[in-house]
Image (spheres, rainbow, N blue to C red):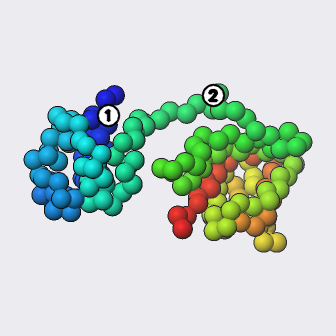
Amino acid sequence: MEVNQIIAQNLKKLRLERNFSLGQLAELSQVSKVMLSQIEKGDTNPTINTIWKIANGLKVPYTALLQQREDDTIIVKKSEIAMQTGDDKHYRIFCYYPNNPQRNFELFQIELDAGYSYTSIGHSEKSQEYIMVLEGNLQLTVNNKTYDLHPDDTICFTASAKHIYTSGGAEELKAVIINFYPVT
């Protein structure tokens, strides 16, 4: 995609997210309404200084107008994800969505064989972990307290401290985990 088309898409998206009219953005950025309209339509390739003015008006980094956006619809197949395992291979984790500059969370599926445990050393300060049990029974120990969860049960906790997952039932545990990292 040509750079003027990338800028056009980003400018329109960012302007509409802020509920700015072209006139309002013209005032904030000191770029004429006509020029902004031409840029949004992809009819012109703005100068570096014009991009800086628009970025300042929108209060976004310069590169926010230049980055080619990922497709809004993403399909991730488990068969295409690299499996990671614990030391004893009884704990398996699949990362569906890693943390990135546009996403301040990670989404995993875990599998833990019946009768086994896995200890997490904890995550970054202020991080939160959300778990939803899909199959099996999860006994989660956090801060020396154990919680018993069954299919369709969820739990949320501060994940910076050590926590222990135990597959307490007779079948393999499967759960979805979201690790959320608040913006500080």
Give the farthest residue toward the bottom.
144
On the image, the x and y values in percent for residue 59 come to: 33, 61
Camera-nearest residue between 139 and 9:
9
Crowd tier of the residue under label 2, counting other residues whose Cα lies within 10 Å: few below 14, some 14–19, many 20 or above: few
The residue wearing badge 1 is: 3
- Give the answer, above or below, for where 23 lies relative to 64: below
Among the two numbered marks 2 and 1 on one chain, the one whose residue lies closer to the N terminus: 1
Relative horizontal placement of residue 19, taking residue 166 as reference (left or right): left
Camera-nearest residue between 9 and 81:
9
Relative horizontal placement of residue 38, taking residue 114 as reference (left or right): left
The residue wearing badge 2 is: 80
Instruction: Look at discs 2 and 1 and give the one toward the viewer.
Output: 1
Can residue 1 be seen from the camera position used here? yes
Can residue 130 be seen from the camera position used here? no
- What amino acid does circle 1 point to? Val
Give the farthest residue toward the left.
34
Number of labels in the image equals 2
Q: Quadrant of the N terminus?
A: top left
Q: Secondary structure at mark 2?
A: helix
